[in-house]
Amino acid sequence: MALVTNRLSDTLVHKARSKLGIRFGRFTIAAIAAFATTEVVLTICAGPLDLTATWASLISWFSGALVSYVLSRWAWKLKGRPSLLKETVPFWIVSAMVVAILTVATKFGYHAASWMNLNETERVLFVDAVYGVANVGTFLLRFLFFHYVLFAASVVQDPPGAAEEALASTDPGPEPFARAAESTGPMRALPDDEDPAGSGLSADRSWLTRWRSRHQVP
């Protein structure tokens, strides 16, 4: 059991550290920030500004979608000016579709609660549950669309691993001995009576040989 748990933990850690896992984590942060923005703006519009339900819903939705758009570009590491037709327009079309799905889900929750003759508390909890399931579903669908379609061009190959980088940094290069031979030149054999350092030892040796022959010293 412990081995299975360790393998599952290692698999989850590997997935979380992968490019898909990092994008998913960043997009989760973007979704939470967008939801919080929607709630704050909706509270301001319905409270201090005293706007109608339609205007409050539209302004709060637009504010949350705007935050989602900016943070989604951050999640996929997009920089520079966005493309209007390839990025901005498709994003807002998807956002409008999400609003439509959530609105239909909310209405379904209201009608289903009335059909089941739920009391006030049960009705609110049931509608919240339906809305939450729809929100999770649209969240996953948006992530898949953004990652594999809308922002797919930003997904590049991962850099080489640490082991490959270390191997490349320690590579001495081709033919190290050949470079050493080229820098020092070919070595040549020296005669026994030749002084390689040029310090005069060869002259002293020749004088000693003549002295021995003159005095008949073996």
Image (spheres, rainbow, N blue to C red):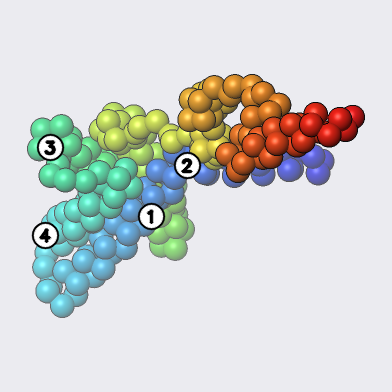
Please state which of residues 215 and 30 is positioned toward the viewer in this rendering.
215
How far apart are the alpha carbons under marks 1 and 2? Answer: 13 Å
**Mark 3 residue type:** Ser
How far apart are the alpha carbons under marks 2 and 4? Answer: 37 Å
**Mark 1 residue type:** Ile
Q: Is residue 184 above or below residue 189?
A: below
Ranked by sequence position, the earlier of labels 1 and 2 is 2
Please state which of residues 146 and 63 is positioned toward the viewer in this rendering.
146
Q: Which residue is mark 1?
A: 29
Q: Which residue is mark 3?
A: 83
Q: Is residue 30 above or below residue 19?
A: below
Q: Is residue 145 visible?
A: no
How far apart are the alpha carbons under marks 2 and 3? Answer: 26 Å
Residue at the image point whose x is 64% and y is 25% from the top: 190
How far apart are the alpha carbons under marks 4 and 1? Answer: 27 Å
The tag on residue 142 is none
Dot 3 and dot 1 residues touching (CB under 8 Å): no
Ranked by sequence position, the earlier of labels 3 and 4 is 4
Foreground disc of the pair 3, 1: 3
